[in-house]
Image: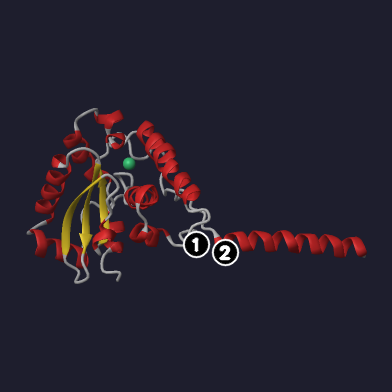
């Protein structure tokens, strides 16, 4: 009986210790992707996904987990860290969020929804003239962004849509905007498959963007 009690007590202590760690420190992890590493080929190859998601994205996650230890950011949600942090923590946290948004908006061409419907489709027509005109603007922003960065379709507080070009890890949250769709124009996103041809990589990306996901992000605040 004593031994049973002792074991119970030990188990309770272990469980409590784990709970207190979870309460005080966020541990971020890669999001599970709803598709296989081969599923976006040939638009995005398995090799690109394995490096981009498995190594680059993972490294940003690992860096955030190291940088928040013992700071006021330790128990903060990711989007709040992106709003408030500066320097290396901002760069890495924004890259985690950016890549979460990016990878989760992709889907195999056979199952992706290839154009938005409903309120997002209406807002795109209102703010850009047409879906095709919006795609042209987004692609133009992506090809003309100098160096590494992101182009974003984002939403302001009134539900109006804007296209943003951001250097490095820039995220629309820093401008009080809601990110809907991010296009990664860092070379690591396309160099394996398209070498220096960023324009062609964007052109090939449209087929694997799932507009159902983007629709679901619109008008949520
Ligand atoms: Mn990237």
Residue 153, picture quadrant: bottom left
Quadrant containing the N terminus is bottom right
Residue drawn at x 35%, y 49% is: 87
Q: Does the residue at mark 1 contact the one at mark 2 (Cβ under 8 Å)? A: yes
Q: Secondary structure at mark 1?
A: loop
Task: Name the residue rendered at 7%, 59% in the picture.
Answer: 129
Pick whichever, 135 or 182, lies toward us: 182
| Pointer 2 local density, CA inside 10 Å: few below 14, some 14–19, many at least 20 | few
Query: What residue sits 38% from the left and 62% below the top?
Result: 80
Residue 167, x across and y down, in percent: 23, 45
Residue 23 numbered mark, or none: 2
Give how far apart the Cα atoms at labels 1 and 2 are: 7 Å
Q: Point out the image quarter for the C terminus.
A: bottom left
SS for dot 2 = helix
Ligand 1 picture quarter: top left
> Foreground residue, 198 or 37?
198
Tell me which label, 1 or 2, sits earlier in the chain.
2
Determine whether the beta carbon of the residue marked 2 sits less than 8 angstroms from the nearest atom of ligand 1.
no
Residue 75 tag number: 1
- Residue found 65% across the figure and 59% down from its top: 18
> How packed is label 1: few (under 14 Cα within 10 Å), some, or many (20 or more)?
some
Q: Which mark is residue 144?
A: none
**Which residue occupies the extreme left position in the image?**
129
């Amino acid at each position: 009986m004593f031994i049973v009690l002792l074991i119970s007590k030990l188990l309770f202590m272990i469980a409590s210790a784990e709970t207190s760690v979870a309460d005080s420190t966020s541990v971020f992890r890669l999001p599970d992707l709803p598709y296989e590493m081969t599923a976006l080929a040939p638009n995005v190859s398995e090799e690109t996904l394995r490096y981009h998601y498995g190594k680059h994205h993972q490294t940003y996650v690992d860096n955030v987990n190291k940088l928040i230890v013992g700071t006021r950011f330790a128990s903060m949600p990711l989007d709040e860290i992106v709003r408030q942090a500066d320097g290396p923590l901002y760069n890495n946290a924004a890259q985690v969020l950016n890549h979460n948004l990016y990878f989760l908006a992709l889907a195999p061409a056979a199952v992706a929804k290839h154009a938005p419907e409903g309120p997002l489709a209406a807002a795109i027509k209102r703010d850009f003239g047409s879906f095709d005109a919006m795609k042209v603007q987004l692609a133009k922003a992506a090809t003309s962004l100098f160096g590494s960065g992101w182009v974003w379709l984002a939403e302001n507080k009134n539900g109006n849509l804007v296209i943003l070009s951001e250097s490095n890890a820039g995220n629309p949250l820093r401008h009080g905007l809601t990110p809907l769709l991010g296009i990664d124009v860092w070379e690591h996103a396309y160099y394996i498959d398209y070498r220096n041809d960023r324009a062609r990589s964007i052109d090939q990306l449209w087929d694997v963007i799932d507009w159902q996901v983007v629709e679901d992000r619109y008008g949520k605040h």
